[in-house]
Amino acid sequence: MQLLLVMKTDMLNVKSSKMKGKGKKVKGKAIKFCPVCGSTEIVLDSSYSGVFKCKSCGYRASIFPSKKERKAQLKIQEMAFVLLAFAILASFVLLFFARFQYLSIIKQAEKIREERAIAMLHGIASLPELSCSSSSVCIDKGKLEVINSSDRIKNNYKELWKSSNIKSIVIETKTKTYVVYESSEKGNFQTYLTYVPVCNHYCEFAKIKVKLILPENA
Amino acid sequence: MQRETVEARTLDILLSNFMPLKKAEPLKVSFEKVNLIVGCNSDSVLGFNTIKVKTRKESEGIERKVYDKYIFAEIRENEKVREVQTFTVPFYMPWYVASLTFLWPKERTYCFVDAPTEIEEELGNETSTGLGLVTFSDQINECPGNSVVVCFSSSNNCDIEVRGSFVKKNGKALPYINKETLYAAIFSDPELYFCNLKRLAKRISLQTEIYKEKVRTLTNCNTVKAETLDSLNEAASRLASCIDPRRFSEALNNLKGNATALSDENRYAECQIF
């Protein structure tokens, strides 16, 4: 049975070598090997015609089994390595892209936070508790004095400031600093400021500074 | 959960403290039709409004709280919205207290029958300053189909009726004291209306404290009496703590009376406080 199989493979080899002549693709060259010791050093025995001899162990036979060179396997292996290398490269590109996207999202978030903070500053300045009664945008110095000096009034608005992630609101004129709100909250902060007129009998420009609590990953 | 929360962010302008809303603007809620749940809580010092977006039966986004806005809306439990119409008006009692925001689904139309000219000029599209948010008509049958019919004179087949100093809707009578509270009563769910009015009363009470301290510093000139401010504060506190809806109208009118008295006193004062 084994001999028959060997013969079949041999015949296939002959076929494949014939096909070579016709310009067909040959997948691999057949190499004879010794069934006793496995050596591939098989030579024609000069003493007998049509008999082959193993150089290594001296085994003689007219038919030696043969095996194909693993070219296709090598090609598959090569392809696998190329694919692996490509996958690694692609993952590096993807990683770089993700990092780039992450940075741009952080930048965008920062920009949005900044825009919101500026809108918030104007919103705080036009809050009825601080603003002048006239339609013009200004802070009433009288109301500011009251809020600055009364902790009880400051505390009334605590939930509003807290829910807006505000750490402190300070209004600085040339002569005085007014604290509208100050919390003992710890963490990362970012200060935003703008200028607003503070009016009583006359108006003066003042800095309104808002310290915002930043999110943990900012 | 995450998706619903992201969708709620499209309402960000409405849900963020200090973010000003335009006089009238449509706001995108979501790409798909969702159910918007507007709530109110008047238990804390300032009280707050809440908004939640619900896309599917069991899926609700995070509830967002807003402390400095007073949102009056009526969105039914199963009503799906993609866009909402908002408009804001300043509320004076007697000084500028806050802005009131009215909100309804963009698909919904309101038809005011026999409305006063003042309201028609503000919400209609006849004048250049009109917001064009509401249809005005002299007869109910001229109102567009499916619109919410608001009658200012006695008629049949009205969804909402304005009678005397009350707005009658859903079998409930909502008292109003001025144009702003009339709008609030028309566009709001009764529960939200009472809750937000209580919040406003609390805000007036807090602002009265600031004005009282301000009056104390004005020693050199004739200004409003501290007692008048005390009366307003008391009226506001009474409204804020009113539990019985039948006494709500009385408390609301009392607040208005005190605010008018203070406004008159301030008008003739040497040093005006507002």
Image: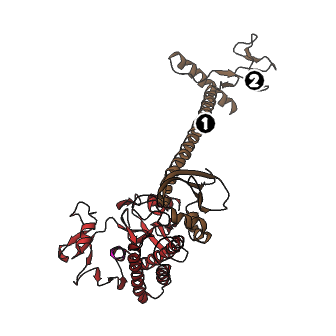
Per the image, the residue denoted by label 1 is A92
Type of secondary structure dominating the magenta stretch: helix
In the visual, does A217 lie left or right of B181?
right
User: Is residue A166 in sight in this rendering?
Assistant: no
Chain at tag 2: A
x and y percentages locating residue B83 in the rendered image: 37, 62
Name the residue: 22% across, 63% down. B127
Report the magenta residues as a range. B178-184
Q: Is A72 displayed left or right of B156 in the figure?
A: right
Instruction: Let me know if residue A214 is in the magenta part.
Output: no
Please, what secondary structure does the residue beneath circle 2 have?
Answer: loop
Chain B: drawing colour: red
Q: CA distance from mark 2 to mark 1?
A: 49 Å
Quarter of the picture containing the C terminus of chain B is bottom left
Q: Is disc 1 placed on a helix, strand or loop?
A: helix
Name the one closer to the observer, B81 or A75: B81
Disc 2 designates what residue? A34
Amino acid at the residue labelled 1: Phe
Label 1 crowd (10 A; few <14 / some 14-19 / many >=20): few
Please name the residue shown 59% across and 51% down the image. Answer: A191
> Contact, CB < 8 Å: mark 2 with mark 1?
no
